[in-house]
Image: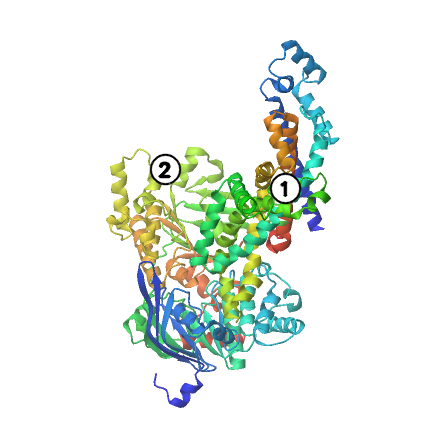
Amino acid sequence: MKETEELKVANILEVEDLGVTFGTDTGDVPAVREVSLHVRPGETLALVGESGSGKSTVALAAMGLLPSNARASGRVSVDGTQVVGAGEAELARLRGRTASMVFQEPATALDPLTRVGAQIAEVVRNHRSVSRAEAAREAVELLRRVGIPEPERRASAFPFQLSGGQRQRVVIAMAIANSPGLLIADEPTTALDVTVQAEILDLLRALAADSGTGVLLVTHNMGVVADFADRVAVMLNGEVVESGSVEQVLLHPEHEYTQRLLEAVPRLEVEAPVVESVPREVAGEPVVEKAEPATPEGEAVVELRGVSVRFGRGPGAVQALQEVSLTVRPGETVGLVGESGSGKSTAARVALGLVAPAGGTVSLFGRELGRTRGRARRALLSGVGVVLQDPVASLDARMSVGECVAEPLRMHRRGLSAAERRARVAEVLERVRLPRELAGRGPRELSGGQRQRVSLARALVLEPRLLVADEPTSALDVSVQRTVLEVIAELQGELGFACLFVSHDLAVVQQFAQRVVVMRAGQVEEQGPTMTTLLRPETEYTRRLIAAVPVPDPVMQRRRREALRTGVTA
Amino acid sequence: METLVYLARRVLQSLVVILIVTVVVFCLLHALPGGPARGILGPQATAQQIASFNHEQGLDRPLPVQYVYYLGTLLHGDLGTSYTLNEAVSKLIEQRLPKTLVLTVLSALVGLLLAIPLGMWQAVRRNKPTDYVITTLSFVAYSTPVYFLGLILVLVFTQTLHWFPSQAPQGDTLAQVFADPVGLVLPVVTGAASMIAVFSRYMRASTLENLSEDYVRTARAGGARQGAILFRHVFRNSLTPVIAMLGYYVPVLFGGALVVEQLFNYPGMGLLFWSAAQSSDYPVLLGCVLVISVATVVGTLLADVVQRIVDPRVKAGQA
């Protein structure tokens, strides 16, 4: 990163030897060490890394938005203004005008009690002395620019009246209100569906290209990096370990960590317009070798037939599922995919007996669930294990790991003695590759990946014939995701349970499931063998869904985007 | 239209609650030791006297019949007759209630006007000396019994400093009460003290929670200054849960009035309730209970309506 003096002046963001330390009750925790990077006008630098790598801290430091217990050292200059050590008044002049920021969670990023138009107008008036009426007009114009339909009407909407994608557009409108030279986007699309993600990335790209804005993009998603960035800096434990052009870093990574990171990224196999753009050693083998899809025989472990579910009553009722039919056979893995609100989690809950269908039937292991009561129903349901998305919320923090895992035994195997229970818990912990000593610990002492393996141990302690996994890895870093998926696949081979795998991540499903069911708006859009459905989808919806997933290869992703724009589906 | 339907539904719900309150009050009336007759005629009354009293008053009829009759008289504004003051309970309450309302509403207003800024200030100065000092004072004010606090105030401001009188205004009409504003100071301050303590705690917690919300960071990233963030965004968001608490606080205010009125010899409902309790004047006691219950229901209703106006999500059923 040698720059001539002349170029240095032109940098909109210049970070030199940045260090950030958080003061906590138990002492100082260094979060960022000796980070140097720069963003030129009109270019996008992606800052990538796993959780805890310090990438968001760098972004916040650049805005002077670090929490009060953080101490920063080094130099951060935005358009020539030194940010580290600057006073609040000086920072306020900078923020929203020279540099602005887009955040990860559009659901909470806006003031719930203020109309969105007023929130945008506020940013305008923070920096320019225009009349209220003029600022309101500008707000409408900005809403139009970020692609909100009927901006005049939407300006007076409250945030809760907008969808997640629209809220993110409002946040972007606030960010570009004063045509900043630098836009910092911290995981701007992580909370959004892939199709919405593609739209938001297109929007950001267009806005940056129009105005020559430099972008610092913080993300963990290599697909987004390939789609959006010009240069990449990879962070590990608070330090930048590798940086360079996007092609160089993503296709020919030099640092061992970058190589590992890229290998762990699940890749969606697509019928690429051009083959052989991915060198073999980088593409990596599929995360998990699938069991041969030898058309599993035998009675279905779970079968939904014409299932309908309605939430609520009257005109406000939501039809969550409509005539949904799907089957999981012994030993096979069925991926259930779709965007948020498509009903995939509801379908999984119906299979778990947690939601009673308004119409249709659910059969578990050949017995109709709706016709069983009491003890018989409990016995039937004990054949199903479940792993949920959030590894923090799904374990009781007041129970030890051992107690968490033993709970199903207490419910369904009442005859077991305490010693037998302990033995079973130890055994299943080792199965999920956790040391048995962990049984005495609390869930909070574990990492996310360990917690999710505890959930898995709890799900498997009764040796179920069916495992329902609802987004089991979407809260985890890619490398951790890989281990968890490997453990599930390995145990599936050993124990032979079937798996209903709910995920929004098509790449993971493609590598993990033999069959896939695509859901949309409460209905099954299409289903079939994974490689058929995801490579040659029959419906336009699935095609769009697949096209929207960015692949972590800048060359291929550029081609796919071109193809998408010209109307040819990649 | 939507709002009207909502209001109608809420008022109906409130009426149901009040009806349940009348049932409870009625049952209490009949659960008195020896029944109402023993209460009125005293321990010396003979069984015959009691029987004839019960017959006169219709107290020997089946309870459901009596309840319907009781409800009928209630609807006519008849709360019965005081045993000791020989006056209609409704008349007594009519005289006393406005004075109590003056006291409680003033206490609540003073309390809130101090508590809300105090709570916000504490949140902004979190874990700094000012926060600690106010927190300590809050706990002292909250844990000091009202009558003790009142006595101390009298000791300091009346006996020592001679700033305010130890007696509240004695007039019977509101005009007379307001003619002596200085006399209202100590009763109102005494009534407001615990309110300040409690609501500054709510406001502090609520503001702290909001200050750590993402939208504050968004506003800051847009170049908003601290003052604008506090008053344009955090204030309203922090206030909504506090408003919801207000409705439930109405009975506490009346409870406070009970002590304050006794202490400062202010002839409002609290004092009426106090003396009725001393002389086992059950019709007066239960009349007061009914009025306070209605006030609570109305207070909660008002709090809900205000919250609906302030927070659009409530209207949409999203919060």
Residue A138, relative to residue B130: is it above or below? below
**Quadrant position of the N terminus of chain A in the picture:** bottom left
Residue at 43% across, 86% down: A9
Residue A35, relative to residue A68: is it above or below? below
The image position of residue A531, as x and y in percent, is: 41, 62
- Name which quarter of the figure residue B230 lies in: bottom right
- Badge 1: few (under 14), some or many (20 or more) residues near its Cα, within 10 Å? many
The image position of residue A166, as x and y in percent, is: 56, 65
Outermost residue, right direction?
A: B76
How many numbered callouts? 2
Q: Chain of mark 2?
A: A
Q: Mark 2 and mark 1: span between their CA atoms?
A: 66 Å
Colouring chosen for the image of the structure: rainbow
Residue at 50% across, 54% down: B204
Say if mark 2 contacts mark 1, CB within 8 Å: no
Q: Chain of mark 1?
A: B
Q: Amino acid at mark 2?
A: Met
Of circles 2 and 1, the one toward us is 1
| Horizontal arrangement in the rendering, residue A255 relative to residue B43 (left or right) | left
Residue at which label 2 appears: A411
- Badge 2: few (under 14), some or many (20 or more) residues near its Cα, within 10 Å? few
Q: Marks 2 and 1: same chain?
A: no
Residue at which label 1 appears: B168
The image position of residue B86, as x and y in percent, is: 71, 25
Which one is nearer the viewer's eye here, A88 or A310?
A: A88
Q: Amino acid at mark 1?
A: Ala
The image position of residue B128, as x and y in percent, is: 42, 59
Q: Is residue B287 visible?
A: yes
Q: Helix, strand, or loop for circle 2?
A: helix
Q: Helix, strand, or loop for circle 1?
A: loop
Q: Is residue A538 visible?
A: no
